[in-house]
Image (spheres, grey):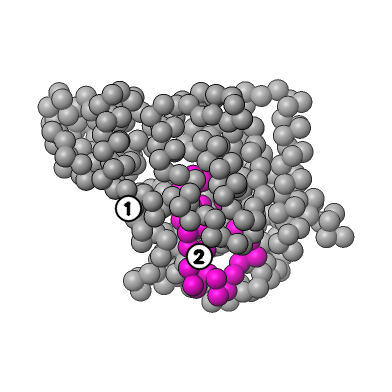
Amino acid sequence: MNYILSYIKAIKWIMSIITFKENKVNEIKFNDEYYTGLNGEKTELRIFYSHKKTNQSVILFPGASPYAENHPAMIMLGNALRNVGYNVFLPRIPSLKNLLLLKENVDWFSHCYDELLNHNAICKKNVMVVGISYGGANLLKASLSESMQKNKPKSYLSYGTYFSINTALNFFLEGKINYKNNEYKITPHEWGMIVLFYNFIDTIDIDYDVKKITKLLKYRIEDNDDEVEKLLNQMTSKNQKLVQNILNGKINDEIKSMVNKIITQNKELLNFLSPDNWAQKIKDKVFIFHGANDSMVPFTESYMLSNKLQNSELLISFVFEHREISSSRGLLFKIKEFIKMIRFFAGYFRYNQ
C-alpha cells in the first residue's frame, strides 16, 4: 500500500508543479505566523497547512532572494507539498532575504529547525527538510550541527544547490560545464555576478567607487530601478561601464580578474560555505534534484555533491530549469523525463513515510 501511495503522491506533486500558473499565485492560501529568530527577534514564517489532518511536515528553507517567502517559486513548492499531504513551513532567513553570504546563515538554519520542532503542528519524528538553491548547501552544512544531529529529520532534499563555489563561479565566468566527457554551453544568469559583487566587491583593492557600486547593486536587488538609474547617472563613465557589465552578466578579462581576487581574498569563508570541503562527513540520507538547464547553478554541481555524500540519491532533470519547466523539448522526451521524476519522488516520499 505504501508503494502505491508513494506513486500517487509523486504524481500529485509533479502535477501541482506542472499546472502552476504564476499569475494565479495570489489565489494560493497560506497562514503567516512567526518564529523566534537567532537573536530573539520576531521572524516571519509562512505555513501551508495540509487540507487533511496529518502528523507529517516539511520545512522548506529558501535560497538567497529578496522576495523570500513571497517568491512565486517558493509558494509553488509549498503549495505542491501541501497538496500531497504535508504541513509545509517556509521560514524567512533575514540575511538570505538581504542576499548576504555569511557563515551566520548556517546558524540561522539550525536555529530555525530547532525552533520549528516546537511548533504545535509539527511531530518531531515526522519532519523532512528541503533546501533550495544556495539554501541547499547551507542546510547541508547545518545538518552537521549538534542540534540537528540530536533531533534528526527523516531526510534532506537539496534542490538545485552548488557543490563548490569555485566551480560554480567558473561556470559564471566561462558559461561552460563538462559532464561525462561532453561539454555543455549554458548562458549564465546575470544574478550570480550581481550577488557576488554585492557581497564581496568591497573586499578587494580596485580603482573604482566601491561604495556607490555596492549601493547601486543593492537597489538592483531590491528592484528599485529608478534609484539604479539615478545613481548610475551620477557615476563616471569608467564606473558606469563596470556596473553595466555586472548587471548584464557580461564577463570580460577585468571582471575575471576581479572574481579571482574575490576568491583569493575570501578563501576562508568560501571554503566554509562549499560542500566539497565537508560533504563527506554527512551520513544522513540526502535526496538531490537538479535541472540540467539551470542557468544559476550548473547541474554538474549536484552530480559532484552526490559523489561526495555517503548516502544520496540523485536526479538530473532535463526538462527543469532553475525554477520552471523547459518549453524547448518534444512531448515524447518530456514524458520520459516525467516518468523518471515520478520514480525519483515516489522513492523520496516512500522513504519518508
Local SS, label 1: helix
What span is colored magenta in the figure?
Answer: 133-162
Q: Is residue 321 above or below residue 118?
A: above
Q: Is residue 158 magenta?
A: yes
What's the residue type where badge 1 is placed? Glu
User: What label sits on residue 339 in the rendered view?
Assistant: none
What's the residue type where badge 2 is placed? Leu
Q: Residue at x 16, y 39 (%)?
A: 205
Residue 219 in view (yes/no): no
Residue linked to disc 1 = 268
Left or right placement of residue 278 versus residue 240 in this view: right
Decide: marks 2, 1 in contact (CB < 8 A)? no
Q: CA distance from mark 2 to mark 1?
A: 18 Å
Q: Residue at x 16, y 36 (%)?
A: 206
User: What label sits on residue 144 in the rendered view?
Assistant: 2
Which of the 4 image quarters holds residue 118? bottom right
Q: Residue at x 40, y 40 (%)?
A: 166
Q: Which corner quadrant holds the N terminus?
A: bottom right
